[in-house]
Amino acid sequence: MTHLPFIVASYAITLVVVGWFTVDAWARMGRARRRLAALDRRPQR
Amino acid sequence: MSASQAFPVPSRNLHRFANPGRFLRLSGRLLPWLATIGIALSAVGLGWGLTLSPADWQQGDAVRIMYVHVPAAWLASFGYANLAAASIAALVWRHPLADLAAAEISPVGAGFTAICLATGSLWGKPMWGAWWVWDARMTSVLVLFFLYLGHIALVRAFDDPQRGARAGAILALVGVVNLPIIKFSVEWWNTLHQGASITLTGAPTMAPAMLWPLLLVAIGAMFGFAALVVARTRAAVMERRIRGLLLARAQEGEAA
């Protein structure tokens, strides 16, 4: 395969950025859900 | 039939989703579908593009960078159009969730614009012999990246979140002028960047063996983008509720 380092770098950057956003979004949702459950005693959605 | 029945008022329909509880219920059901479809389509498209699609006769295997660069470029503009739509909903109809959605779209849009710029640079070096040129297309996408960063900074720059959201919405709407500049830059100016291979009005100038994986990744990335924005907006809605509860408790404590 020609230009392999450029191809690997492109895919790696894409996966790292998208992966970081995904992990951050799900972790943030989990934190908010737990904190809200602790504060708000109404049935959770 | 009255005029309002014949032509539904957008704000009335939009405000059906303004209730945070309803939004959390609906988005909770929608999110797994968006994420699953996004991951599945992107994985199939990227696998296809990396292994089964042919190399280009001029560019060789460097053309495979297209399968990440082009969807990121489309999403950079698509994300900004959504940011502008959310800003209109916030400014004109005072939709309570539009401010939150706008604040969550801009970091994701900035991320995809950064991917577009970085992968474009990695494509440009072996093809043009330069990491960067001040070409109209590349410069206008760089301006888009700065508009996203400006929006992120502006909505967080005020003590009053509503003032920050309003300033951010105005910036987002002013920045919309950059979207047609990005789209038509390759026609209006002499650019090193190639013209569009896929248009809404004409047949694509790309081989089907390359076009299908590209479209799969693009559609998958769009679902992924939507999943990220919905997930972040859900978190923001819950965080706002937490702040409200803490404030109410603090006020109760002061009153007692």
Image (cartoon, rainbow, N blue to C red):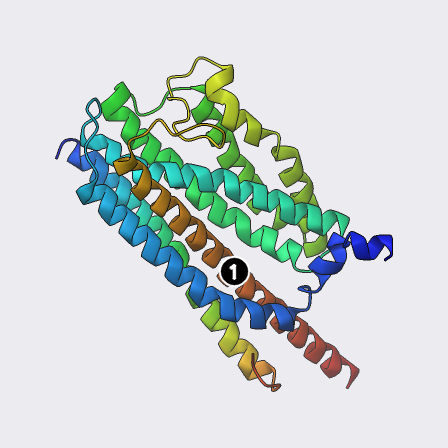
Counting from the top left corner in percent of width and height, residue B183 is at 50, 28
From the viewer's perspective, is residue B86 above or below residue B176?
below
Q: Quadrant of residue B83?
A: top right
Q: Residues within 10 Å of mark 1 (few under 14, many from 20)?
A: many
Question: Residue B222, can we see it?
Answer: yes
Q: Residue at x 29, y 53 (%)?
A: B43
- Which residue bears the numbered disc 1? B230
| B220 left or right, relative to B159 | left
- Of B215 and B153, nearer the camera is B215
From the viewer's perspective, is residue A11 above or below residue B11?
above
Position of the N terminus of chain A, as image quadrant, is top left
Counting from the top left corner in percent of width and height, residue B138 is at 43, 26
Q: Mark 1 falls on what kind of element?
A: helix
Position of the C terminus of chain A, as image quadrant, is bottom right
| B221 left or right, relative to B82 | left
From the viewer's perspective, is residue B85 above or below residue B39?
above
Q: Residue at x 60, y 51 (%)?
A: B102
Counting from the top left corner in percent of width and height, residue B245 is at 66, 76
Q: Residue at x 47, y 49 (%)?
A: B108
Q: Chain of mark 1?
A: B
Question: Residue B238, can we see it?
Answer: no
From the viewer's perspective, is residue B238 above or below residue B148?
below
Q: Quadrant of residue B123?
A: top left
Q: Residue at x 47, y 72 (%)?
A: A31
Q: Residue furthest front?
A: B1
Counting from the top left corner in percent of width and height, residue B111 is at 43, 45
Instruction: Tally the numbered discs.
Output: 1
Q: Amino acid at mark 1?
A: Val
